[in-house]
Amino acid sequence: PPPMECIFGLVGDGFTLLVADASARRSVFLYKQDEDKIFPIDEHKAMAVTGEPGDTTLFAELIQKNLALCTLRVGVPRSPHATAHFTRAIMAENLRRSPYFVNLLLAGHDKDEGPSLYYLDYLASLQKLNFAAHGYGAFFILSLFDRYYRPGMSLPEAIKLANLCIAQLRLRFVISTPAFTAKVVDTDGVRMVDLKNEGVRMVDLKNEEEMVVVEE
Amino acid sequence: GILSRKMSIDTYNGSSMIGMIGKDCIAIASDTRLGVQLKTIDTNFKKVFKATDHCLIGMTGLATDVQTLASVFRYKTHLYKLREGEEIRASTFSNLVATTLYEKRLGPYFADPIVAGLEKDHKTGKIVPVLATYDLIGCYQKCSNFAVGGTSQNMLYGACESYWKENMEPDELFEVISQCLFSSMDRDCLSGWGAEVYILTPEKLIVKRLKSRMDQF
């Protein structure tokens, strides 16, 4: 499937921020604009997935449930490092059988490792990174991160940077992706974050007044 | 990808690698770029792995297969150690690499390894360097001077042929291997963004990270 959906993430001071666009679309149709592509894997891990429509949810849930089983068996949750390599192993094993066309970003927080972000593409190439992005949007987002990302950013700074990336996509990316969801992973766990992207909002089609958009 | 060019599996991620023999020492150098066609994902991607304390294996080609093979070789060398009671010798390991690749003859790993190691000849006690290169299905080729691989392979051949000479000490070997790698890597858009050089002597392993031209060229 063409990589029009965009997910990105960055590691900050004691947290990892994951942002995913909230659109579900097939060819020329836009089904919904409030799709949540960021799955909580564990108490301190989250995975943003993009790619082949059925595979994404299937694979995310596969990892979620297998990790829950691991935790039940062992008693202690797996570290983000172990989780990332476990995920890669499953993808690599299936690569030459029945591949999962899923690109994902795995965010985790650990007492020893601190916050972490793992990039995993559909071929099962794994790399631990400070910031990463998938999809066509990555061409814009990575450049902005190269310029503005600093290690140890605070959450408000990270959200500001995320909003800058979203604004850039709105301005220069041919596919319109107005809505984004974001989740942050830190010592307290996985929680939703409101990006408050100014000027980017979903149109309420039931409200006739909203249908007339006047740009000044 | 974003440009409509025909994708080739061995140029999908991009890499450059050299192995070189010196006087009682051996060196292996690689770039550290992880790319997806023309997009660079990371500049710190590991392509050279330790098989044992006296043997290194570096792999070029598809990044996922480089990582999978690194696990496979780690698994095989660990089991060897448990079974045999001692670490695998460099020449034995180089054979193991060939057979492992051939196991997948009809559905190969898209990686071209270079094995660089040192072993002691049990009769004469002399240090024998082991340098071998393979194609994706395990065509084992022993090298007596240098081995190259990756997307800038052709350029590497030229550079190494000009500057390699026999019996180089570790310092000179480091200098030569680095310069050869840089001159070829800098002309290849798919590899570069930093380099790692491993120099293996009988006493120690020296690892150096080098900052090359940090751009696409």
Image (tube, grey):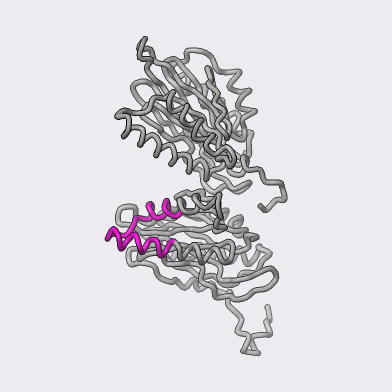
The correct choice, above or below, for B173 with respect to B73 in the image is above
- Horizontally, residue B146 falls left or right of residue B74, namely right
Give the number of marks. Answer: 0
Q: Say which of B3 and A167 sits in front.
A: B3
Q: Quadrant of residue A103?
A: bottom right
Q: Say which of B188 and A48 sits in front.
A: A48
**Which residue is at a point 42% across and 25% down the rendered structure image?**
B90
Q: Say which of A174 and B9 sits in front.
A: B9
Residue A78 placed where, x, y %? 34, 57
The correct choice, above or below, for B60 with respect to B167 in the image is below
- Horizontally, residue A11 falls left or right of residue A31, namely left
Residue A200 placed where, x, y %? 58, 74
Q: Quadrant of residue A167?
A: bottom right
Q: Is residue A83 magenta?
A: yes
Residue B109 seen: yes
User: Which residue, as the protein is rendered here, is positioned at the far left?
Assistant: A75
Q: Say which of A36 and B122 sits in front.
A: B122
- Horizontally, residue A26 falls left or right of residue B49, namely right
Looking at the rendered image, the quarter that the C terminus of chain B falls into is: top right
- Main SS of the magenta part reads helix
Q: Is residue B122 magenta?
A: no
- Horizontally, residue B86 falls left or right of residue B217, namely left
Residue B107 placed where, x, y %? 58, 42
Question: From which residue to which does the magenta span run?
Answer: A63-87
**Which residue is at a point 62% across and 75% down the rendered structure image?**
A31
